[in-house]
Image: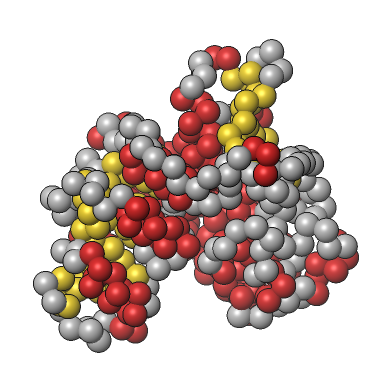
Amino acid sequence: MVGVSVLGISGSVGSSTVKVLRQFRDQFSLRSFSVHSNWEVAKSLVLEFSPEVICITDPKLVGQFGDSFGSTKILYGDENLSELVKLPNVAVVVTAVVGARGVLPTIAAIEAGKKIAIANKETLVTFGPLINQLVAKHKTLMVPVDSEHNALFQLIERETRSNIRAITLTASGGSFRTLPIEALEHVSVKQALNHPTWSMGPKITVDSAGLINKGLEVIEAHFLFGFSYDEIEVVIHPQSLTHGIIETLDGACLQYTSHPDMVYPIAHSLFYPNPTPQMLIERKPSTWKTLEFFPPDIKRYPGLELAFQAGRAGGVAPCIYNAANEEAVALFLEEKISFTTIPRLIESALNQITNVFPETLEGYLEKDKETRNYIQKEFKKGGVTT
């Protein structure tokens, strides 16, 4: 039995991971997991899987449920996420928490020699150079879980690197793909959370609506696969059936296509380097009907262009991009700023905060904190938020 730890098990990726674990009970064992505040989900999963340890990260709930539930130990706070991944019986860590808070447990998993199924894109976006150094040092196996990166991972593995001219990430276009651009200033939170294809958490759904999620994925792809930003492309693909494309030197394109369900990349990452041994969801090509691809409109999605700008700048610019976005999206979800203010705040942070090239985690964390403080100050004084 392969022991699995899932960080963020009550979210969309975590819930899909549970589906896969249920389907392959004879091969995987859930040894630890975290939730932020959803005790009902945590309790039901403890009763079902009997893990060794769980962690509840909401600081408001510290100690509220005691230090154990049956034979399962209960920990509290983000600072204990690393304890979940270091358990001797854990071989695979699924990092599905949202935001830069996933970096410390990811580093702990790298240093502990675990296979990492990484769904926390912010870890690579914010701390990419540092994470890659640690992965190389500890010879860690890191398999991407995001559907686009997992698709590219599988395609790249099957092709000679020198024969790949470019890689392409697909995007559904989000909730406002066909909305008149002039109407974006006035969209509501409810409208933004109405994603046409995927069922995801609120932060990621808002990111998708502005293609900022794809911007984060562009930066992640750079650090995962080593392609330059001139070799990474993005297309709008409304059907969300093709998840990744590689273009070879002769101009041919190879694509990975599947029903839009996270069980495919999750199962692949859990079983890798072995293939998933049985059918997950049967969807024949005859059911696809049509596959459409369009270039993204930068006027509609300015946050995507800012991601390329941050990526090319290097240093802590991707860290600034991510932190500014996290703070801005939180303000939007609280209905304190408009949807179009999100990329304006990101651009302001990239222009105003000094870019540096740290050699330590602390250097990145300092810029992350500085960026968050900057966004909050800009919001309080009005600035670009009006």
Q: Residue at x 61, y 75 (%)?
A: 333
Q: Tell me: residue 367, above or below residue 74.
A: above
Q: Residue at x 53, y 37 (%)?
A: 151
Total marks in image: 0
Residue 18, visible in the rendered structure: yes
Q: Toward the viewer: 92 or 311?
A: 92
Q: Residue at x 60, y 54 (%)?
A: 213
Q: Toward the viewer: 350 or 187?
A: 187
| 261 with respect to 59 (left or right) | right
Q: How is the image coloured?
A: secondary structure
Q: Position of residue 22 (x, y in %)?
A: 33, 57
| 139 with respect to 173 (left or right) | left
Q: Tell me: residue 195, above or below residue 255.
A: below
Name the image quarter holding residue 335: bottom right
Q: Toward the viewer: 215 or 199?
A: 199
Q: Position of residue 81 (x, y in %)?
A: 27, 62
Q: Tell me: residue 261, above or below residue 179.
A: above
| 124 with respect to 343 (left or right) | left
Q: Tell me: residue 234, above or below residue 384.
A: above
Q: Residue at x 64, y 74 (%)?
A: 332
Q: Position of residue 221 (x, y in %)?
A: 53, 38
Residue 375, visible in the rendered structure: no
Please identify the quadrant where the C terminus is shown. bottom right
